[in-house]
Image (spheres, rainbow, N blue to C red):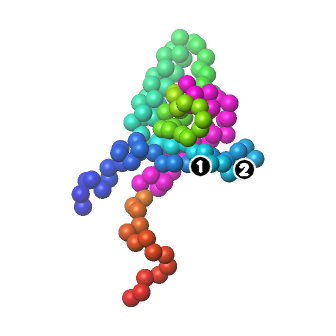
């Protein structure tokens, strides 16, 4: 067995396309590209958030957990096909104003099988003949 079988960084950083639905559940033609929780940007943002939280607490300052969550989730978004330009600030605006998307992003990013499952070697369906 090769150690390469355990490598995840490339796929984690690429992300997967996730369709967006309206808050009432109706499907749209829009999507987000969401990275894995193991993506470099998220891991770095998580370290930075912990450090900032510890610094704030040491100074007796309050920590804005909502803004921290927005910032962390924003690092998981790698792209979209919305009408607005894909920028870090626009992603944060979307995630502040649509908190249900933060929850969806968290759930998607934390499911490793969505990113690392081996693709099927046979595109046919059903049982194989012996």
Residue at mark 1: 19
Point out the stretch of residues depicted in magenta: 89-116
Q: Answer left or right for 103 relative to 115.
A: right
> Which residue, as the protein is rendered here, is positioned at the far right?
24
Asked if the residue at tag 2 contacts the one at tag 1, i.e. Cβ–Cβ closer than 8 Å, the answer is: no
The Cα–Cα distance between marks 1 and 2, rounded to whole angstroms, is 11 Å
For mark 2, what is the residue? 25
Residue at 39% x, 48% y is 11
> Relative to 127, is 98 on the left or the right?
right
Among all residues in the image, which is located at the extreme bottom?
130
In the displayed orientation, state which residue is furthest to the front: 83
Q: Is residue 106 visible?
A: no
Residue 53 percent across, percent down from the top left: 52, 21
Residue drawn at point x = 61 percent, y = 22 percent: 64
Inspect the magenta stretch and tell me whether residue 104 lies in it: yes
The N terminus lies in quadrant: bottom left
Out of 41 and 126, give the one closest to the viewer: 126
Number of the label disc, if any, that sits on residue 30 = none
- Is disc 1 surrounded by few (<14), some (14 to 19) or many (20+) residues within 10 Å? few
Direction from residue 11 to residue 127 in the image, left or right: right
Local SS, label 2: loop
Q: Quadrant of residue 73?
A: top right
């Amino acid at each position: 067995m090769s150690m390469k079988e355990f490598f995840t960084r490339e796929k984690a950083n690429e992300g997967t396309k996730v369709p967006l639905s309206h808050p009432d559940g109706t499907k749209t033609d829009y999507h987000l590209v969401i990275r894995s929780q193991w993506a470099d940007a998220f891991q770095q943002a998580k370290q930075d958030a912990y450090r900032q939280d510890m610094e704030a607490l040491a100074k007796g300052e309050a920590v804005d957990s909502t803004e921290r969550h927005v910032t962390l989730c924003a690092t998981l978004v790698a792209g979209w096909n919305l009408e607005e330009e894909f920028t870090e600030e626009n992603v944060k605006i979307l995630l502040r104003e649509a908190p249900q998307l933060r929850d969806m992003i968290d759930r998607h990013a934390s499911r490793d099988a969505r990113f690392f499952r081996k693709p099927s070697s046979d595109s046919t369906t059903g049982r194989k003949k012996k």
